[in-house]
Image (cartoon, coloured by chain):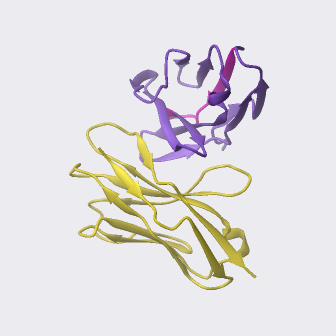
Amino acid sequence: AQKITQTQPGMFVQEKEAVTLDCTYDTSDPSYGLFWYKQPSSGEMIFLIYQGSYDQQNATEGRYSLNFQKARKSANLVISASQLGDSAMYFCAMRGSGGNEKLTFGTGTRLTIIP
Amino acid sequence: DAGVIQSPRHEVTEMGQEVTLRCKPISGHNSLFWYRQTMMRGLELLIYFNNNVPIDDSGMPEDRFSAKMPNASFSTLKIQPSEPRDSAVYFCASSGVFDQETQYFGPGTRLLVL
């Protein structure tokens, strides 16, 4: 069984500062994928970034980067130079191997950017 | 390009009524997913299809829920009869052959069963 743990229910960060959202995972699958999604107050789920378990380098997408530490089973999201529009819920998710494409989600972290 | 399209966006119904949620995946995508989001249970997969065939329906709560995918561009999730505990946001997502790693979500249907 797969499990995603997000231990920060809420975070407050000053605008323009960097922020790290924590995510740890547990799986017995030999290969897997890790995702981060953003859910603003309007409710849609926006894909941010993906990391494959065999990828040698940490994924980056603009201001988003994923700090992947396989031995520690962590996949933290780093947002650089935070903006007011970054205020939202952030979900970490995992997809296992074996042909099952199902995503398992964490409970989310509510990020609030303070001007 | 159009993203995943869901309808209706909001649905209010009374207990016992039938509810049908609709989804049009991104053109060319071959996998379609139905998720439900509630405060108590978070985001959970209900069912997913690959090439119109149901692959994993282990998350479907009970016989009151059914899902179909008659063709590559359309899927429905039906609740009959609906109950207040079915109130939630229902998301449809799709992923493609050449981008199987990423699921793209629709805007969701917010369902309230009174």
In which quadrant of the rendered view does residue B73 lie? top right
Q: Quadrant of the N terminus of chain A?
A: top left
Residue B70 placement (x, y as % from top left): 54, 15
User: In front: B31, or B77?
Assistant: B77
- Judge by depth and name the residue closer to the eye, B40 or A13: B40
Question: Is B47 on the left-hand or right-hand side of A112?
Answer: left
- Where residue A27 appears, as percent x and y from the top left, is 27, 52
Whether residue A58 can be seen here: yes
Q: Say whether residue A69 is magenta.
A: no
Magenta residues, start to end: B18-33
Left-right relation of B107 to A59: right
B100 lies above or below A75: above
Instruction: Please say if A79 is above or below A45.
Output: below
Observer-nearest of A114 and B6: A114
Q: Residue at x 38, y 39 (%)?
A: A101
Task: State the yellow chain.
Answer: A
Expressed as whole percent of the image width and height from the top left, the position of residue B94 reads 52, 38
In the image: residue B75, left or right of residue A104: right
Would you say residue B31 is visible in this rendering?
Answer: no
Chain B hue? purple
